[in-house]
Image (cartoon, helix red, strand yellow):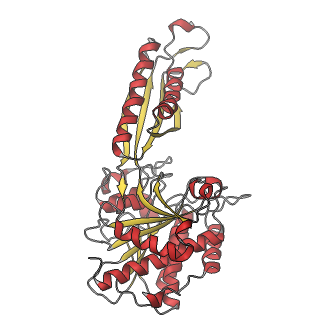
Amino acid sequence: MASYQNIRINGDRLNSTLQATCTSWGALSNSTGMRRLALSQEDKEVRDWLVQECKSLSCDVKVDQMGNIFAMRAGASKDRKPIGMGSHLDTQPAGGRYDGILGVQSALEVLRTLKDNNIETHCPIALIDWTNEEGARFPGAMMCSGVWSTKSSTGLEACYAVKDTEGISMKQALRDTEYLGETPCDYRENGLESYFELHIEQGPKLENANKKVGVVTAVQGMKWFSVRVSGVEGHSGTTPMDVRSDALVTASRLITAVSETAKSTGLGVATVGVISNDTQSQATIPSGVEFIIDVRCSTDKMVDDLCTAIFKSFDEIIQKEGDSTGYKVVRTWGLPESIFHEDCISAVRSAAIEEVGPSQIMDMKSGAGHDAAWTSKVVKTTMIFVPSKDGISHNPAEYTSPEDCALGAQILLQAVLRYDESVKQGSIS
């Protein structure tokens, strides 16, 4: 390992590649923002570019049934699975240049650095681009890493059937972009030795604490629910106020209760970010409203407790309204709390201490979901966080400095090499 400690990634190359590829494929006009939805033309083009870059580094590239890209650099051992690195290249409709993208570009920079220095690792090293992490086009965040893990409640065929707002199915989009691969999307048939994911924090904790690196130990649990509120349509001019059954008024009170319950219990966070009204007429009393609740807490029990408290408050509101409005709830998605593996955490921590010293690192639990959460269910996993300016993400103003991007990539490189050396020496089985 000592001979590898002086190997440095090329920070200028990393940052120029990241910015150039963002500008070329998916940049929003008049801002630094991005719109690169999963399996869009922009996503296809940046994927095509990534595949060619990896092949130029003598990587064996394969695409699985959900379009996940695995680019593998051979190691000395012929019987070890690859150490994985990566994230995602898709973005929110008006997202930034770093969420996910930094993780994939840094994995590419690690591969480039290994080749530049003629390093032969013990294990193969794999770059991974996970498909549809954001779930912005095809509903279902971290969709394809979830399928790969086999632990998601939404399996391969169900994901194939998911449609975007234009009625295009996931499977059709995979066909259209030529990323409907033949490799099984199943860790048991296309497995990893371990997985490391570099990511921006997407929150303010590192910046507020004046720390440089987050050593991520876990991802909090989360659940999503679809709530449908029902009422009775009526004429807005002729229906007296005291006999109305207004679904939108009731929905507004339920939505307020979501936020107030999360605040009053202190169990976690809860958000309503999507709402739709059936009638959409200014002259009609709404009879149906749907909204989505996103609940996230440190532990699965806290998630369940917060959900219970929210729905109890809903029942109290409906009883108080007494106007024939009602609601129904369907759980649409969930991710159990994910605990990362100490072997990977130790490799990241030691690499981070080597780079910035112990005073500049912070152990963290991720509040956002990541592909690493699903991989952790089946292989040893951890993440590295670098600061997000003002804690902003999912926004064109998202920003992480070139220096912090390069630092994260350097720690990724050294963590992977440390882990690989431990496997070679037999201290990690």
Q: In which image quadrant can residue 79 be found?
A: bottom left
Residue 270 vs 206, above or below: the answer is above
Name the one closer to the observer, 142 or 425: 425
Q: Is residue 328 above or below residue 331?
A: above
Q: Nearer the viewer, residue 89 or 161?
A: 89
Residue 307 in sight: yes
> Does the rendering let one see residue 178?
no
Q: Residue at x 57, y 19 (%)?
A: 284
* Relative horizontal placement of residue 284, taking residue 370 as reference (left or right): right
Instruction: Give whichever of 34, 419 is nearer the camera.
Output: 419
Horizontal and vertical percent position of residue 98: 58, 63
In front of the other: 166 or 27: 27
232 on left or right of 329: right
Residue 321, relative to residue 130: is it above or below? Answer: above
Residue ID at (25%, 68%): 188
Q: Quadrant of the C terminus?
A: bottom left
Q: Considering only vertical position in the picture, is 305 above or below 165? A: above
Query: Where in the figure is residue 357, as x and y percent of width and height?
Result: 54, 72
Picture residue at 53% right of the left edge, 28% below the top:
256
Q: Position of residue 143 (x, y in %)?
A: 40, 56
Q: Residue furthest right?
A: 30
Residue 29: image location, x then y, percent: 71, 58
